[in-house]
Amino acid sequence: MSKYVYMFSEGNAKMRNLLGGKGANLAEMTGLGLPVPRGFTVTTEACTRYYEDGETIEKDIEAEIFETLAKTEEMIGKKFGDPKNPYLVSVRSGSRASMPGMMDTILNLGLNDEVVTGLAELTQNPRFAYDSYRRFIAMFSDVVMEVPKSLFEEALDEVKASVEAIHDTDLDEHAMKQVVDRYKAIYKEQKQADFPQEPRRQLIEAVKAVFRSWNNERAIIYRRMNDIPVSWGTAVNIQEMVYGNMGNTSGTGVAFTRNPSTGEKKLYGEFLMNAQGEDVVAGIRTPQSIQQLQDIMPDVYEQFIKIADRLENHYNDMQDMEFTIERGQLFMLQTRNGKRTAAAAMKIAVDLVDEAMISKAEALMKIDPKQLDALLHPTFEPKSLEDASVIAKGLPASPGAASGQVYFNAEDATEASARGEKIILVRLETSPEDIQGMNVSQGILTGRGGMTSHAAVVARGMGKCCVSGCSELSIREKDNYFMASGKRFEKGDWISLDGTTGKVYENAIQTIDATLSGDFATIMEWADEYRKLKIRANADTVRDAVKSLELGAEGIGLCRTEHMFFEPDRIFAFRQMIVAKSEAERRLALEKILPMQRDDFAGLFKAMNGHPVTIRLLDPPLHEFLPQEDQDIDQLAEALKISADDLKTLIADLHELNPMMGHRGCRLAVSYPEIAEIQTRAIIEAAIEVNKKGMQVIPEIMIPLVCDVKELKYVKSVIVDTAEKIIAKAGVKLTYLVGTMIEIPRAALTADEIAQEAEFFSFGTNDLTQMTYGLSRDDAGRILDTYYQKNIFESDPTAKLDLIGVGKLMKIASDSGRASRPNIKLGICGEHGGDPASIAFCHELKFDYVSCSPFRVPIARLAAAQSALSDLDQMGQK
Amino acid sequence: MSKYVYMFSEGNAKMRNLLGGKGANLAEMTGLGLPVPRGFTVTTEACTRYYEDGETIEKDIEAEIFETLAKTEEMIGKKFGDPKNPYLVSVRSGSRASMPGMMDTILNLGLNDEVVTGLAELTQNPRFAYDSYRRFIAMFSDVVMEVPKSLFEEALDEVKASVEAIHDTDLDEHAMKQVVDRYKAIYKEQKQADFPQEPRRQLIEAVKAVFRSWNNERAIIYRRMNDIPVSWGTAVNIQEMVYGNMGNTSGTGVAFTRNPSTGEKKLYGEFLMNAQGEDVVAGIRTPQSIQQLQDIMPDVYEQFIKIADRLENHYNDMQDMEFTIERGQLFMLQTRNGKRTAAAAMKIAVDLVDEAMISKAEALMKIDPKQLDALLHPTFEPKSLEDASVIAKGLPASPGAASGQVYFNAEDATEASARGEKIILVRLETSPEDIQGMNVSQGILTGRGGMTSHAAVVARGMGKCCVSGCSELSIREKDNYFMASGKRFEKGDWISLDGTTGKVYENAIQTIDATLSGDFATIMEWADEYRKLKIRANADTVRDAVKSLELGAEGIGLCRTEHMFFEPDRIFAFRQMIVAKSEAERRLALEKILPMQRDDFAGLFKAMNGHPVTIRLLDPPLHEFLPQEDQDIDQLAEALKISADDLKTLIADLHELNPMMGHRGCRLAVSYPEIAEIQTRAIIEAAIEVNKKGMQVIPEIMIPLVCDVKELKYVKSVIVDTAEKIIAKAGVKLTYLVGTMIEIPRAALTADEIAQEAEFFSFGTNDLTQMTYGLSRDDAGRILDTYYQKNIFESDPTAKLDLIGVGKLMKIASDSGRASRPNIKLGICGEHGGDPASIAFCHELKFDYVSCSPFRVPIARLAAAQSALSDLDQMGQK
């Protein structure tokens, strides 16, 4: 039979999955002999049962709760519901991971009209007793019975006004009794029933409320954002009350063993005398710094310091503790590894190693790679931010902070940039036509589109800040203004964006650049000592290449050549190529692009200084390069010297029902081998040119969207024929690789055949995921909302690597690819390449490298190290 | 070392893959001691080498050819190129499968200016010698050297005119010499070189020409249509010449052991005296029936009859033979299992069993299931067809013949149908809006779209004839006419379509209906004795259900409910549902549809009389149900009592970038569970109603487009809750199954999880193939043409089941599905379900059933029997 309830004395810190974080640590502290009020934990498995049983607590679990309650009654010599010697409890939630958004705490549970009089007598403190009772009624009504909190706050204010009291502490016993009566009346009016007087019913209802709160909307959103599975459930901690509100020798507070903002090694915290925990949070009185406790109660302070030291040494990490002092006696209510800023996390990790408390490996395992993101983008200078006013809030689509003058189209933005202005590009939504405008902007703001919209994906790729889907804005692109908070912002006006929070500010705000130095640099060095995976970056420009090297990239894993075609000086030639009626005409247009593209590649090769560079041949469907608006079409037709009607017909002909599964990728190279040929020429000629200067460039030419080995073979033959001719003519030696993206399910399924032609595989998990799910990222918005609501998906399946479906394809592909070409190079590009969970999976599949956007390189380095360390750990356990 | 050349005496009929069909049978006849001119075969592997070596015959193979040539010289005592005793040969192609479109024959090879004089002397027949030479020059120039045939024909006509000859036989020795001189001059003018005089060079060039012809355009097209892989290659047969043109005791002919049109057991064929094979084909003189040979050369006839009997008994099948008589001596030049009409195939198979020549199992294996198609659709009455005139030709998109009056939109067609007219629906291309119009039509004719266009797929599903992509037509839908062959066809004019040939005729033509009776019925009974797979039909209407039962279906494997929504009396209610702003409004609209849909299902259940019926819940994206044209939108908006602008906004909102991977399938049921609920009500209520009349309906409710077990679980819960309530309320017992389509790669990859909820899997290989390939069928047209040209694809990958990619997913899914639910029912629906190769694969995976369009049911029955028999055969071999 399962055991659903554990006394604190029965558990320990290792039982976190079963007891939740709070419960496990209370048990651990109890085991260490620290002063912890006695109690017990209802397990996370009971929560799972609650949902399985149709949101109800079955008799067996209820019985176990009361049996354990009875045991604690014996231990402490008080009885639950006994007016003469009442046992009151707190009820707190506590899941494996700390989760704001869930129900937190109910204090003083067990009180009723009778018990409160007993408590008053026993403590000889009726004011305290009725204060406790009124707090309990309000908390219970609010969090368990869903009676609006504001009703109680209003009633309290009214009583205070009637006795001319300013603070709660000004209310005497009689006023408190009056508050209790008012609260009970409110409850009765709202629930058409008396306030529950039966302590056992109060307890079970409170436990249910905790379980229920696991699935409230805020909790669901938090879980989705933090990849916490719904299956974990929450535990419930039931603990003997201790009182910080029993007069001037009582109090309550929170403290960290080190500063959670800076990491400084110094006790950091605050407390309030004569108060319960909620008062600290509510900010009714200004708390005192923890150091001031030394003056007020030196013994208690001394004891607390010792406990804090002991806990930090026991957990080998910075601790976040809650405590209560009841009439001069210290009680520990919680300890946990403290949350900290990214900067603090770095400093603490390095300091703990310096203090010989933990090893380098342990330090690396302590840092959440995702947290590094905050260190890798510009942020607003905190002082300047204080005076800034928020005009709207959208989705935090790409992190970082930026200020600039607003422009509403790519052309204006490009011109303004040429004048040296800083730009925020504001669009309803972006399309590939906007690439150049995005490229010259400091940040991008869109009115529509989600976290995986075009704007969001491209901005993250470029490492630019982006706020997307800001529906509060009313954007008039054609009239060059937008409205926000009732104010009109014209072309050229300054605004600021915070892509980490989604906030949009009026005016310019000073920013601070990110640097990889100090503790951060130290952590990165340590990560490099352990990791097995190479880390590459996705970079299309010299600027990105330089940035990625700076952040530790060891090569470029994906250079998308199509972005290069959007540059204003070549989009025209490219469009000429698209409208060309013959191969000869197409070649003429391509020849114009050749020297520019060769310079692009030469620049990249030089910047990467001998590191490998993977260049993907043209991928998107051609219609993405043509304008859609009548006016633009007319203009283009004139420039191309064809009729607008002809151009419209051509654009209509290029239209596809499902462009994602249409004429793109290597299918373009099959139709127009001259495109692949010119791109190969640009790559090989650039490599030869750069190698002449003494570098050792080994270009990797990547063929996208392969679904059958024969198409790969065909395009490869075009590449190899072209390359060999150039190399022979130049009379040099040049090594280059030809490989393919694995981004279509069939490519993964037939990887054994494909590997016979491909010298490397780069998994394009963006497209692979969409096709494996049969779900288009661009169309998923409407679908996903409903799927979240109905708990079908817990997060956007295209946003992280799906290990069981897509992962199975990746495993099939890597196994069978290696079987037919043992030395095949395996990597991943696309956004998943920078996600720690995906990196762990790539490590497991023994990939050679992962490639991600430049700003995620440090995250990838750390995640790769953690994967390698987990291996060591598992080997150790065997 | 490989052997690339086999004497006829070294081979036999089992070596077909290596020697080709013709070569293997020549060897077999040689082995049987029949009078076969001596010779040898260059193997299909030599053809493969030819392509591997860069379209050249390497020295080793050339040497082997000449060595074998030398051996045959010794055997027959003549020498190749020796004017005194010349050895002349024929060169013929011969692949594994008989393939029109490839190079056929070169006769008299080995002749040159010198040898021809020797031949004249030796035979004492100079006219014969020069006749043979001029034939050789023309054939060699045409098929080997690509000199246009017409030049030779013109020259021959000129010579004939100059000597006032009518027939070739009227030309004497001198005239023939003149022809030879003219021919050599033509060759020299065209090729800037003398006609090749070196017999060995002639031979090697001829062999190369045969190999080359394996990859000419006609051969490629034929292979694609008949699923013949390019890797097979062709063999070349080189054989001593015998002459049917040596005077009146010589002749040549072809004969079948039974009538290839009717199957009647009677020698059938024709011959020409004093002629070479090409004369029979060219139809210069009218050949005589084979029976007339008895009068002319009774001994030869007697000998031939005996050989024909012997060959039929030897091969246990009807034989198609070529023979030549040289100066009274009979030679066999070819035998093979004769091609026959579908009707003849049935009769011959049944007769051969009756004659105890073969077993039932062998009879079944002899019939090509695809051939049955011709027996399953109406055909034009042959007499009426004689006077019909073809006005255009399109793609043979869905077989059958039909006549009707032309209408250009679904509405007019529906009205005309209500008046009792027969209709041919003519559209530029069809869309789901046209379903109702297609449904009331006899046939469909479209101006655009390929073999897998919407019109083609739907028509095949409905079993209606369809000619698609008829680009010769100029169709003006709005003006209600089309132009063809310079003639204008107005609304209401009669035309006729042959969906088997793609031809479009003027006026009505009488048709004959298909029946499943006589020999055909016998064959089907035998097939049912052997097959393991159940055969179901895809049927949406009672008419289809009845037809499918008639053709032997054992259930409905796919009933698409969406077609039902297009019926004119309910499309409006369905559109009301789409524009509804709340669940309540949606329910109101759905309630209107409920009784109609319940009647549909009750009708189907009754028609199927207890056989299982799988009903798929609504699948297509909602935008497919809304109009696209301004005028239609205005009309609908008025009817719906909303503004046209609002409706346009709604239609724009529903627009998707990649609708195939968008909001459709079970995703609709997740968004609007009330749709699934109403459909379930209709199904369950109909089943209860029908069961009350004593039937035993077990409905199978199928959830489409599942990619994750959780969405299946959710929709299933809606279905089960609804069904259980109705069943409980009705107080009856009803068994029903809930299952899913496997049509998204991830569903196949996670089939173990999905099988925990699904009681059956139906593989939707149409969508599964497209997503596995990342290739949209609707957008593939442009891509495929290039892929065929470049030999990357040999046929449309979405048109047949891809065993190595999609097949791997199917195997993963069926294995892991069975592992988690051993009794899970597995089937396939979609067009592949009627394809023999796919059926063999489904048999191999031990599926329970295949489901196909009603008219393919007999094909599936036979193919399933053949799969089972192949198993037995393989077990026998072990």
Image: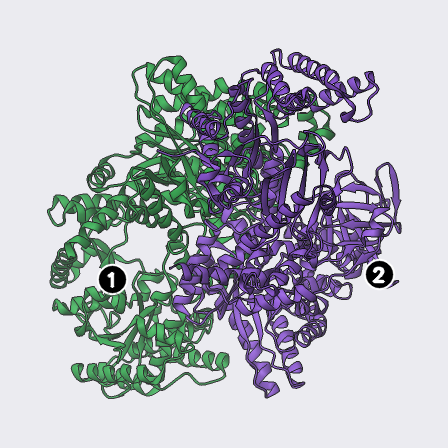
Chain colours: A purple, B green
Q: What element carries label 1?
A: strand
Classify mark 1: residues with Cα within 10 Å, few (<14), some (14-19) or many (20+). many
User: In this picture, is A382 found above or below B105?
Assistant: above
The residue positioned 62% from the left and 46% from the top of the image is A303
Give the residue type at disc 1. Answer: Gly
Q: Is residue A184 left or right of residue B307?
A: right
Circle 2 is placed at which residue position? A417
Vertical comparison of B520 with A260: above or below: above
On the question of residue B793 being in view, the answer is no
Label 2: few (<14), some (14–19) or many (≥20) C-alpha neighbours in 10 Å: some
- Which structural element holds mark 2? helix
Amino acid on which the number 2 mark rests in the picture: Ser
Q: Position of residue A816 (x, y in %)?
A: 40, 62
User: Which chain hosts label 2?
Assistant: A
- Work out whether residue B514 or residue A353 is closer to the camera in this orientation and state it: A353
Name the residue nearer the viewer: B540 or B487: B540
At a point 52% along the width and 45% down the height, the residue shown is A774
Q: Would residue A208 be visible to someone looking at this image? A: yes
Quarter of the image where the C terminus of chain A is located: bottom left
Compared across the picture, whether A835 is left or right of A752 comes to: right
Q: How far apart are marks 2 and 1 (CA)?
A: 85 Å
Question: Residue tagged by mark 1?
Answer: B253
* Above-or-below relation of B127 to B452: below
Name the residue nearer the viewer: B177 or B387: B387
